[in-house]
Amino acid sequence: MEKIAEFLGGIGPYLLFLPLGFWLSKKEWVPKKYITSPLIYVLMPVLVVNHVLEAEEDTIMVLPVMSFFLALLMNVPALLANKTFASEENPYLVKSSFSFFNVAFFGIPTVMALFGEQAVTSLITIYVGTALYGDLIGYYQVSKSKNGTKESIIKTLKVPFLYAFIIAVILKVLDVEPPEEAEPVTDVFSYIVSAAGMLIIGMNVSNLKIKGIDWKYLNKFMALRTVGGIIITAAILALEYAFVDKLDEEERQLLALIPLFPIAANITVFASFLGSKEKESGLLVLYSMAVSLVLICIAIQFF
């Protein structure tokens, strides 16, 4: 119980930003782009560059690859969902909901609460892999559903994360180290990203109406996503341990937590783009967060 209390006490302050975002959206005082633009174009790119530079080379070579394949292989249970209980849903939206994990906004406060600030560096390297999948393959697939190939490629190449990652890799190859003065700044950025991410989720569900929601469908969706993610992650970790064995115990625990993380908030952006169940996607994100809190509270008992 002590571990659970510590975890909830650590992430609790960030969860308070959910109702704040809901309230701000209802009042229409703050346009969402005023929050998302600094996150996408400034805060997250800075965090990616800084933490990639801080990470060990073995970590950079292994964790992003493992998390990328986790996101990619989550298409398998997504296809199963589309062929069974989610047959009427947009396949791109279902795939995105299965493959996109909220590693940054939810993951940072979770990891800081469970492992301390030093673990954020490993988490960001995991985020690199999931973001490479989501911002490149995932975004291209969704864009392709409404645009031509050329336009979809152009839209994908505009994603700022791609350039932040390229810059980080180049600086790492050149053995550039982040200045000590940057550490307090990036620590503050981590807190801001987590708080702003919760704020966005709250804003995304502001027009949601609970009445008429198909809870049976949501439960099936979350069950298949969670079980599928756990099985795939276990297989990836087993392969890494058998053939590579470069990760330490904490890094393996971090990766094992990823399938328990909620659906990334940007799924609501994709739903809006596709014009497909925008409000329901907001509920899916919020519901998956509630499920994640319960699952993580259970999982940390085994750490």
Image (cartoon, rainbow, N blue to C red):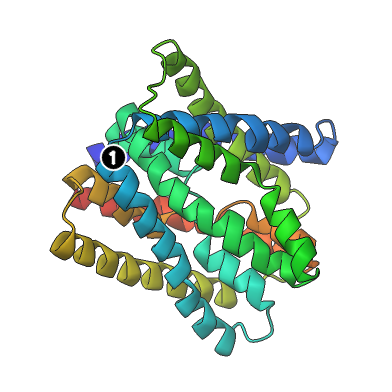
Which residue is rendered at x = 65% and y = 60% of the image?
A: 139
Q: Residues within 10 Å of mark 1 (few under 14, many from 20)?
A: few
Decide which of 297, 72 is in the foreground and name it.
Answer: 72
Q: In the figure, is residue 60 to the left or right of 47? A: left
Q: In the depicted view, which residue is nearer to us: 284 or 50?
A: 50
**Which residue in the rendered view is the most extreme toward the right?**
28
Please name the residue that numbered disc 1 is placed on: 57
248 left or right of 131? left
Q: Quadrant of residue 195?
A: top right
Up/down of 216 relative to 233, above or below = below
The picture places residue 78, in percent across and down from the top left corner, at 52, 77
Circle 1 SS class: helix
Q: Amino acid at mark 1?
A: Glu
Name the residue located 21 percent from the left edge and 48 percent from the top edge. 247
- Occupied quadrant, residue 228: bottom left
Residue 45 on image: x %, y %? 56, 34
Residue 209 makes an appearance in the image: no
Residue 29: quarter of image? top right
- Quadrant in the picture for the N terminus: top left
Q: Position of residue 254 (x, y in %)?
A: 30, 47
